[in-house]
DNA sequence: CGCTAATTTGATTTTCGTCAATGAACGTGG
DNA sequence: CCACGTTCATTGACGAAAATCAAATTAGCG
């Protein structure tokens, strides 16, 4: 029983390409992998699970003995505040390992929510431990990738802490576009954005009202167009310049990794 | 030869305890280490360097083939913005490894600045690679610690994105206090804070003017006292409650680590 | 077709930023 | 030891960005 209703209306996101070997693909992008390493990575992807758009995978504070590899679709991690506010911390795309918030302690530090319909592989934490032992080079690579993700988080912090609404929104849109393009191929400059104004605001530290206003301001300037949930960045270069968006190098350095 | 000028006026921070084995101590806190593991960690701490308060260790964008272990003192990592603004991303204390911003690429993604006089060990990146290979368990532990740090960064993002000035300042003060207490022992509730209003503002996304106002508001409420660079949190419990500060568990989970 | 959730809109308030001036603390060099 | 310059903290008046509040409209979904 497929989770996503079949046939007819093909969604904009190629989310049904349940890519076995998502981790392998992602890590292989940084480094040529040996057969043994590829096998080890595929070995992690055995417990497949499906989630519908909007559904919660794990809840903040919940005990959790496993993490997830994204096989298709995308998700976000968030935390709740005492005043019932919410901060969306980051988004996860195909090949990402949702280790950060569930590996440090016996419980999850953030809620993981499916943005689109998606497929995940459940990985027991012990399996990750074994990977570090059997394939130290992959362990080190995971460490490097994690460091890169931490830089991405820092970029978000910088955006939220030090820039105005237009810059924050513009930056976020460009980031999401970049990520989706990696998965779905360069889809022109329009993509489906199944996020509410509230979601966007929770990601960049604004109220939904103000996000709406800001989006319309961007529309007014002819920088973006919207139609339903589909968003089009009319002039990517112009928006990039306007908000000072810097795309980080996608490859991580691997020269320091140990021999396999 | 102590790096900090000798004699007389003993600084408030016990920064001259150049603790060889800082990494060993920090990781040993989470997990009983074998002799071999201890040796390997000490092996990393051979190139000792000293920096005066305020000096820059590495500059954002600079090519860098090494990272640092903090042996004594504290530092912060920051990035500059196009408009000449600055975001302080995180602080580093004794035992911390400044890997995040210099391991992912061939250059440093953030500027590392000494807040107090401090002693660092320079670690070549290759040495870290070797550590992952020779001691996979330590590699995995580093991964876990890095994940915990990422959660800390997320907490900061949440603070900046979703709370007001008083909460942000209060939270930051409590965090710094917690960290310093780990190093210097429970110093009552007062500590030296060698940060300018500008620094504080750059850390939590406020202007120095508003930081000043907010600090005085906290003083007015009798929650803190200030005298020069020394700050005292009069009623830790009250402040903790007021800003909803949640101290994260200091131990990371180690049950998933591979055998040594 | 009707219900709910999400978006749009406008009026108003608040928080925080900006600008500018003053003064204290500190270090340096004459 | 004092004059000087620099940096940082303080203060107040003002302005702007974003939050809040409250409808009204639209879109999505069963």
Image (tube, coloured by chain):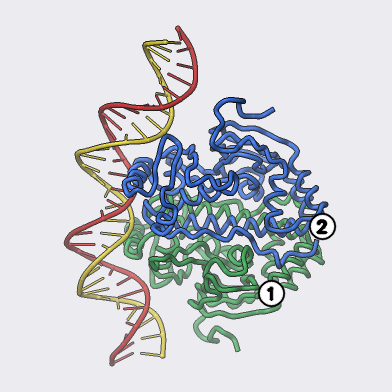
Chain colours: A green, B blue, C red, D yellow
Return the mark for residue A260: 2
On screen, residue B148 versus residue A233, left or right, reads: right
Where residue A108 sits, quadrant-wise, is: bottom right
- Residue B185 percent location from the top left of the image: 58, 46
| Vertical order, A5 against B84 (above or below) | below
Residue displayed at 55% across by 62% down? A179
The image position of residue B104, as x and y in percent, is 65, 50
Q: CA distance from mark 1 to mark 2?
A: 23 Å
User: Which quadrant, please, contains the N terminus of chain A?
Assistant: bottom right
Helix, strand or loop at mark 1: loop
Choose the circle earlier in sequence order: 1 or 2. 1
Q: Residue furthest front?
A: B188
- Residue at point 72% right, 72% down? A44
Q: Residues within 10 Å of mark 1 (few under 14, many from 20)?
A: some
Asked if residue B109 can be seen in this view, the reply is no
- Could you say which is closer to the camera, residue B62 or residue D27? B62
- Residue with the mark numbered 1: A20
């Amino acid at each position: 029983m497929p989770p996503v209703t079949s046939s007819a209306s093909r969604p904009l996101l190629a989310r049904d390409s349940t890519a076995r070997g998502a981790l392998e693909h992602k890590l292989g992008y940084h480094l040529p992998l040996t057969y043994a390493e590829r096998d080890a990575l595929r070995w992690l992807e055995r417990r497949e699970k499906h989630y519908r758009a909007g559904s919660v995978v794990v809840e903040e504070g919940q005990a959790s003995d496993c993490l997830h590899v994204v096989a298709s679709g995308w998700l976000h991690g968030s935390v709740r505040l005492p005043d019932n506010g919410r901060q969306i911390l980051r988004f996860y795309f195909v090949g990402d390992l949702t280790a950060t918030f569930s590996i440090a302690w016996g419980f999850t530090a953030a809620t993981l929510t499916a943005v689109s319909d998606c497929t995940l592989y459940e990985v027991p934490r012990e399996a990750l431990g074994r990977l570090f032992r059997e394939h130290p080079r992959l362990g080190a690579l995971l460490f490097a990738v994690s460091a890169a993700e931490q830089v991405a988080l820092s970029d978000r912090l910088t955006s939220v802490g030090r820039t105005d609404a237009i810059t924050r929104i513009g930056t976020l849109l460009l980031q999401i576009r970049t990520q989706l393009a990696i998965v779905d191929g360069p889809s022109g400059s329009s993509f489906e954005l199944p996020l509410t104004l509230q979601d966007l605001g929770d990601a960049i530290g604004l109220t939904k009202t103000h996000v709406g206003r800001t989006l319309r301001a961007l529309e007014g300037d002819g920088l973006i167009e919207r139609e339903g949930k589909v968003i089009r960045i009319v002039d990517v270069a112009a928006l990039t310049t306007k908000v000072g968006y810097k795309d980080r190098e996608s490859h991580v350095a691997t020269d320091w990794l140990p021999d396999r």
